[in-house]
Amino acid sequence: MAHVDGTSVELNRWSSRRFVVALMLAGGCAVQDGDAGEHAGTESGPSPTHDDSGGLPDTGGFDDGGAGTGSGGAGGDEGGEEPPDDMDPGTSTGDSSTGEPACNAADPVTLFLSPDDSNSMSSPVQARAAVLGNFGSLSYVALRTWEFLNYYTFAYPAAEPGTVAVTPSLVALDGAAPGEYLLQIGVSSEHVAEESRAPLNLTFVLDTSGSMSGEPIELSREVCRTIASQLRDGDVVSMVTWNTENAVMLSGHAVSGPNDSQLLSAINGMEAAGGTDLHAGLVAGYELANAAREPGVLSRVILISDGGANTGVTDIDVIASNAGANDEDGIYLVGVGVGNPDTYKDALMDDVTDAGKGASVFVAEVADATRQFDHAFLSTLAVAARDVQVELQLPPGFEIVRFSGEEYSSDPAEIEPQHLAPNDAVVFHQHIRTCAPELVGDETEIGVIARFKDAVTFEQREVARTMTFGELMAGDPALLRKGAAVFAYAEALKVARGGTSADKAATIDAALVAVALAEAGLPGDADLVEIRSVLESL
């Protein structure tokens, strides 16, 4: 019998691969497509990665070791060898027989984190639809772990106006080697009430090609109608539909308020037919958006498509050149995916929204349109803080073993900052460990700095938090447990998609353990209910 984060798990053999997978998943430390050390680099720091594919796991075997040596820490589950008593812990030479690196217990570790693809939330909706709905199998779905942390709700305290709030939390990873922890960092924005939001300049760029026939065009109309219900006097809307030709339906139309009759008429009149010319549709959309721009008005292009057209360099250039740079306001692109497994092309939406610095969402059913464009209207469309980047300061000897975001590095220039919406939070969940656990005590410190630009003035600002291990371990772990459950769920889906039956059973069981731990602190949480239903259906 062993304990995984405080929960008993029956073992046949300590060294069994099935248990290793269970331990890693329940601790928020899942096998990521057989890529142990995916984010790892050399002793100078881990190198960034950018894996949009969410590719299939390596079914030939799971790596039971850890990440590389970004902090000079030891690889492998057992950690580095302890230096002799008379040796300076900062000068350990490592184990030449195994090739494990030296334990650098002298130099503090500084890493820069990014979730990338700001507000990207498409993967979890596709995955849920694949398991519970009619979206085909998981083999159609690109599973990007950070999108699951973006999609599910974390109730971190709202920041004061014009700034962000930083909330770190930490628990020891019970059942693992000494010196292993789960660390979660929430960076939350200010709360903005709907009645106090800035005016909006929205431009709908709507795919009406033949592949959108049936449910996709119906969902596209539903998204547009939901957005229309949230508009108010002073908002400006333009609309262009595209297949092989563009049709400008509205240009700089000032709506009268919610459910403007002229806007609804244009929405309800959309029909799907013909081929696809995405490039021309985007060019026309940005021309309309620029023509209607006014100072102090948030500008958004909302692209709704099944992704049936491939984007070329010119299209990406059109988007990126309008997304704002060098302390300029921009026209941010919100990508809304609709469709079915036979036609939907996820890569298009992921690429264009990354370039457009906006949200990427998927709508599989009417309830998804309500969630993203009614309940989360402002957090999908607005900006509270620009160019957010997080610096994590760890004690000597520490490294990240698994990371929920898309990239991290010891070089801030290698990490692309992202915007943060109001009424929202970005969450970084990671499994960390030290090669020198004997040096960690209650007074050992972890520092977090969130740097960002003011949403209106572009003034550079930062918020810093330094807390001791004792303070962090005494805090409420409820949101960290939820993060571990979400992480384990996302990674279990990858194994379920391409692993063996035994590995699938082990990872699903372990993910359910992580969900149970989270439910104990957040009973009745709607996100955990959804996650449990998908896992149990697998």
Image (cartoon, rainbow, N blue to C red):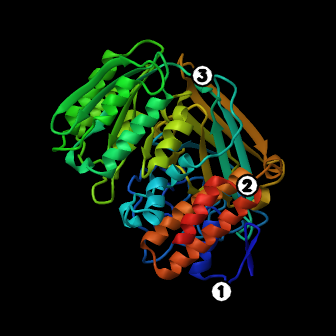
Q: Is residue 441 above or below residue 35?
A: above
Residue 178 position (above or below residue 197): below
Side of 98 where 276 appears, left or right: left
- Which amino acid type is marked by label 3? Glu
The one of 517 and 170 positioned closer to us in this rendering: 517
In percent of width and height, residue 129 lies at 45, 59
Outermost bottom residue: 12
Q: Nearer the viewer, residue 477 or 93?
A: 477
Give the mark nearer the N terminus: 1 vs 3: 1
Disc 2 from disc 3: Cα separation = 30 Å
Tags 2 and 3 touching, CB below 8 Å: no
Residue at (67, 59) in percent of width and height: 433
For residue 440, which quarter of the picture?
Answer: bottom right
10 Å crowding of disc 2: few (<14), some (14-19), many (20+):
some
Closer to the eye: label 1 or 3: 3
Which residue is denoted by mark 3 in the rendering? 195
Determine the residue positioned at 48% across, 59% down: 128
Residue type for callout 2: Leu
Q: Amino acid at mark 1?
A: Arg
Distance between the Cα atoms at labels 1 and 3? 59 Å
Q: Is residue 228 left or right of residue 310?
A: right
Badge 3 element: helix
Instruction: Mark 2 or mark 3: name the one nearer the start of the chain.
Output: 3
